[in-house]
Amino acid sequence: MYLIGGQTHPLDLPEIRTRIAMFLDITDCISCMQVNKTWHRDFAGSVWHTVDFEDNETFAEISPTTVTKYGHLIRRAINIVKEDHISALLNPAIKSLLVVKFNITNNPVSRAFFFDVFHQNKASITTLELSASLLDPETDEDQRTNAIYFMTLDMPVSGSKLTHLYLCSLNFTRHNFSDILHYSPKLHYVHMFGVMLLANKPHFELVHHYGVKMLVAPMVQMCDLRAEFLHYCPHLVNTDFENEESEPDDVADLLVEAFNRLQSCRIYYSLLNKTTVVGILQHQDTLTHLELALTEDLTDPSLSDPNPYAKNLVLLILRSCRNLRIFRAEGHQMDIDLAEDYGWSCIDLIEMRFRFQGLDTFVAIDDCLEQLSAMKSQGLDGTETSERSLSLRICQKLLPLKKLQTVWLDSKDYSLATH
């Protein structure tokens, strides 16, 4: 295929075809594969890239000869539940999986086969999600009795590329969990829900993993494993407290006792009080990203601030955390009268998400942001003038934030030009 003047048509370039394949559905890719041999090769990767057993139960019925021919193209195997799912993945051609999501059962045969699949791909897997079907246990004893116990992954240090680990409703001995960390030197993200670490081998030396920097887990899970964090992962710098029903005192204790030099933290806005602020300010010199999360049903601009006691506390955070770059508190309504009395040390903010009291319509918000953008483009510095409209006062408060790129005041993300 050529253009006038002898130029090559873009579709004759393999890199262009491969790029286009990323945006087509499987049916279209299969049609493209039938054009010729080169198109077949370039579009086959998208067809075979992901095996989702929830959407495609028939994969297990594909002939071994076909899987042998294309198995090397499979990169993701997800929603693996049944024994025939696992058996289908045992084809020797499937040895380059990057993402594996497996629902573990107490069936010993299924678990044994899964370990074969894992070992066959352990040199390529970067994301591993292991979960078990378990009703929420009411007591620790329920979990100890009924939860699924997991064996060590037994990965050689030189072979593991694992960076992301998701664990749900599983029990580990300390030895097993420590082995996972030991054999995953590139691991930096851990997400745990309903995980229990059982004490054993009291003289067993815990592995210190200096690469894990992000932990996502329910608050109760973090409290239960508080002692393990500092032993297992002393360099954790990012955390996400997932449970909004936690006690503020527990959040504060965890922030103080279980983390050193946090850089990123996400907690629920409803938990913000004097105690949790003390925990946050424990990391005021290193914190760059803080999110005070809120459920979507409370972000309507007509609703009042669900945590009215947070007005001064939010300002205290902005005044104290000088390295803050991203601050998100979509439920917070800032009082401009109070804000003008507080200096903000976080002058390098690049993203800011909260509301201003009195700026309560989308039209008013959009007008304020347009005014801020215009003043920023003119190089104004926020010096007070005789005009004291709410919109101008907000602009004067935000103009000193020279690096501010994204502002959300409850209407939409607004991008500002930086100089």
Image (cartoon, rainbow, N blue to C red):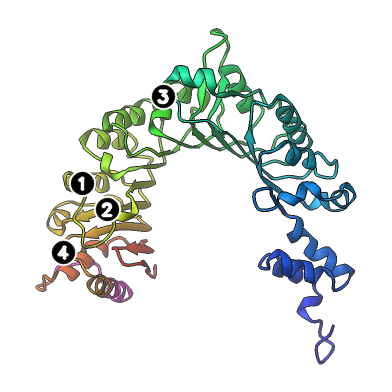
Residue 101's image quarter?
A: top right
Question: Mark 2: which secondary structure?
Answer: strand
Labels 4 and 3: the sequence-earlier one = 3
Q: CA distance from mark 4 to mark 1?
A: 16 Å
Q: CA distance from mark 2 to mark 1?
A: 8 Å
Question: Mark 4: which secondary structure?
Answer: loop
Is mark 2 in CB contact (under 8 Å) with mark 4? Answer: no
Q: Which residue is mark 2?
A: 331
Residue 404 visible (yes or no):
yes
Q: CA distance from mark 4 to mark 3?
A: 45 Å
Labels 3 and 2: the sequence-earlier one = 3
Of residue 310 and residue 283, the one placed in the foreground of this image is: 310
416 relative to 331, above or below: below
Question: Mark 1: which secondary structure?
Answer: loop
Q: Which residue is mark 3?
A: 138
Disc 4 residue type?
Gly
